[in-house]
Amino acid sequence: MRVFVTGGTGAVGRPTVPALLAAGHEVTALARTPEKAAALEGQGATPAMVSLFEREELASTLAGHDAVVNLATAIPPMSKFMSKRAQRDNHRVRAEGSAAVVDAARAAGVGRMVQESVCLLYRDQGARWIDEDAPVDDFPMARGNFAAESSAHRSPCGVVLRFGWFYGPGAAHSEQLLAQARHHVGMVLGRPDGFLSSIHVADAATAVVAALGADAGTYNVVDDEPLTKRAYADALARAAGARTWLRGPGRAAALLGDRLTSLTRSLRVSNARFRAATGWTPRYPSAREGWRAVTA
């Protein structure tokens, strides 16, 4: 396939571009700067200097492609994560940018769309397993993702991937958590016995490749074994080679309300539907194995 990728230089895009190329696909990827264009060329992709928000220019660029993979985000760093102002750019990319990409793809006759989303949209289900039919929650930070999902489903074959919490090389938030672990701090947001569903960025990349053959629909892409937040912090500490001296903020994080609600809830998400639909299997069954590989 000829595949066009947005967000090809981001945390998930960086491993996705070579994974697509290794699978035999021809890849064009959006680049916003000459430096990013050079990085994409170095991987073997064809860079396209075009704006995510310019429908006509995008449609011209997308002509002749078979699929679009939209991985574009503007997630702020942890230091600004709770800032509504910092979240505006991400909302615009998710809502306006995704709509523009789908409109351009439809105008160019591209029938297959793969859209990145997140499993943090689901309501807290405690220790119960969560599949794609579980209820989702409407809170401010989720609305951009809902808009992106809605846009993707306007495509003749729209595939939405609700990813777990990314970790691994290039995933800035997880790299900050690893740095804290090396300083003996274990970050636990919400109840320690609540579940956190994660995914290594390398496994996210192979999931994107597999999604090119999936039927239209919404799929969860997470580890086989979600860990409790206490177990996740312990896995991170072992990978960092440092005992945890301070753990928190725990339940107190809930006091910050909807600005952290996506991270404080318990989400034990299942990947069974995506595995059955595509045959995809994560290389790292849980964050225990994944974090060991990151620091090996």
Image (cartoon, rainbow, N blue to C red):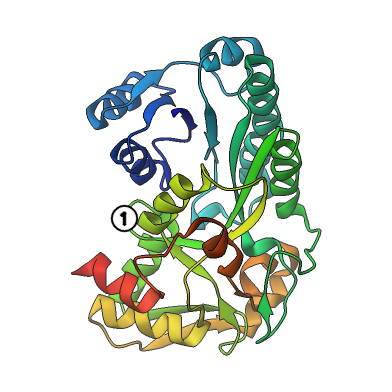
Other-residue count near label 1 (Cα within 10 Å), few / some / many at <14 / 14–19 / ≥20:
some
Residue 89 at x, y = what percent?
62, 37
Q: Split into 4 quadrants, where in the image is the C terminus?
A: bottom left
| Apparent side of residue 289 relative to residue 73 in the rendered image (left or right) | left
| Amino acid at pointer 1 | Pro
Q: Is residue 164 visible?
A: no
Above or below 141: residue 220: below
Please name the residue shown 26% across and 74% down the image: 292
Residue nearest the viewer, comparing 170 with 107: 107
Q: Split into 4 quadrants, where in the image is the N terminus?
A: top left
Residue 63 at x, y = what percent?
54, 13
- The image shows a total of numbered marks equal to 1
Above or below 34: residue 131: below
Q: Which residue is mark 1?
A: 169
Please name the residue shown 72% across and 80% down the image: 125
| Apparent side of residue 152 relative to residue 41 in the rendered image (left or right) | right
Residue 214 at x, y = what percent?
57, 48
Residue nearest the viewer, comparing 70 with 235: 70
Q: Is residue 281 visible?
A: yes
Q: Quadrant of residue 253?
A: bottom right
Q: Determine whether the residue tagged by mark 1 lies in a helix, strand or loop.
A: loop
Above or below 268: residue 141: above
| Apparent side of residue 25 relative to residue 93 in the rendered image (left or right) | left
Above or below 88: residue 36: above
Residue 53 at x, y = what percent?
63, 21
Please name the residue shown 32% across and 67% down the image: 179
Residue situated furthest left in the rendering:
296
Please name the residue shown 51% across and 78% down the image: 226
